[in-house]
Image (cartoon, helix red, strand yellow):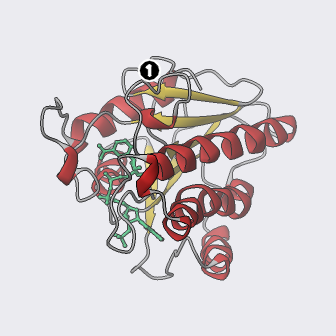
Amino acid sequence: MKHLPEGYRALVLGASGTLGSALKAALEADPRCATVTGLSRRGTPPLVLEDEATLRAAAEAMREAGPYALILDACGALRLDGRGPEKRLDDLDPRALARSFEVNAIGRALVLKHFIPLLPRQGRCIFGVLSARVGSISDNRAGGWYGYRAAKAAGNMLLQTAAIECTRSRPEAVFAALQPGTVPSPLSAPFLAGHPTVSAEEAAQGLLAALDTLPAQRGASFIDAKGQAIPW
Ligand SMILES: NC(=O)c1ccc[n+]([C@@H]2O[C@H](COP(=O)([O-])OP(=O)(O)OC[C@H]3O[C@@H](n4cnc5c(N)ncnc54)[C@H](OP(=O)(O)O)[C@@H]3O)[C@@H](O)[C@H]2O)c1
């Protein structure tokens, strides 16, 4: 990451996941990066999106070794409590919709609440979150996947709102919602047929390169692994 300060520190949330672990490995290979810390649900301290106390405690535990010029949130879930994405209106279930929002939108909002304060106040810094192209309202041409799409769109709105607030005090901070491409992982495995895929390593390299050159602005960007803007 050539545009972050030499010796920058990085934090990857969801580091147990396919994309989270690839992002962590890519940062470990960056000679400019001094430390990369990964947090995850079964790690120490644990990071459980449905439990704000774990997010608060994990952020507090990370504070002393900070600030972190790069924070990436690679958490997210498509299949929850044994239920996959809905194909049609008739499949909608209130509990399943609420669970997707709990993890993909509210969990994300609480991550922003507790981890944005770990960014430095001065200089360039980056907060990137794994979103998904299916969370784009204007790009939705295929339909289906109601809960995941809506929760990702809500997560994007929460990011944009937090970015507007936080770029007031950190004018060089970059906030971005990220589309990695279709990456084989436990999350995507049942839905890969007929889709061209990219490896997690390739997606991670692309996302980091895109983030490195993304200019700071008032609010967040929504980009893919080639750095192309995605319509909200
Ligand atoms: N793969 C794709 O093609 C693709 C495409 C577009 C967007 N994305 C997005 O990219 C992100 C990463 O996906 P992935 O493909 O790497 O999936 P993955 O391998 O299943 O990783 C998901 C990560 O999220 C964590 N997680 C899930 N629910 C959690 C919860 N309630 N509390 C704390 N952590 C939780 C998992 O923790 P555990 O290890 O403990 O389960 C894991 O670290 C997601 O936001 C996904 O929506 C992926």
Residue underneath mark 1: 227
Residue at 31%, 57% in the rendered image: 21
Image height of 198 relative to 98, above or below: above
Q: Residue 81: which quarter of the image?
A: bottom left
Q: Is residue 124 left or right of residue 176?
A: right
Q: Residue 127: which quarter of the image?
A: top right
Which sits in the foreground, 209 or 224?
224
Location of residue 178 in the rendering, given as x and y in whole percent from the top left corner: 47, 36
Which residue type carries mark 1? Answer: Gly
Location of residue 89 in the rendering, given as x and y in whole percent from the top left corner: 46, 48
Image height of 165 relative to 139, above or below: below
Residue at 67%, 69% in the rendered image: 63
Query: Residue extending furthest top?
Result: 228
Query: Residue extending furthest left?
Result: 193
Element under label 1?
Answer: loop
Quarter of the C terminus within the rendering = top right
Location of residue 93 in the rendering, given as x and y in whole percent from the top left corner: 49, 64
Which sits in the foreground, 224 or 30?
224
Q: Residue 52: which quarter of the image?
A: bottom right
Query: Residue extending furthest front?
Result: 90
**Quadrant field for ligand 1:** bottom left
Q: Is mark 1 within 8 Å of ligand 1?
A: no
Q: Does the image show residue 122? A: no
Residue at 64%, 61% in the rendered image: 106
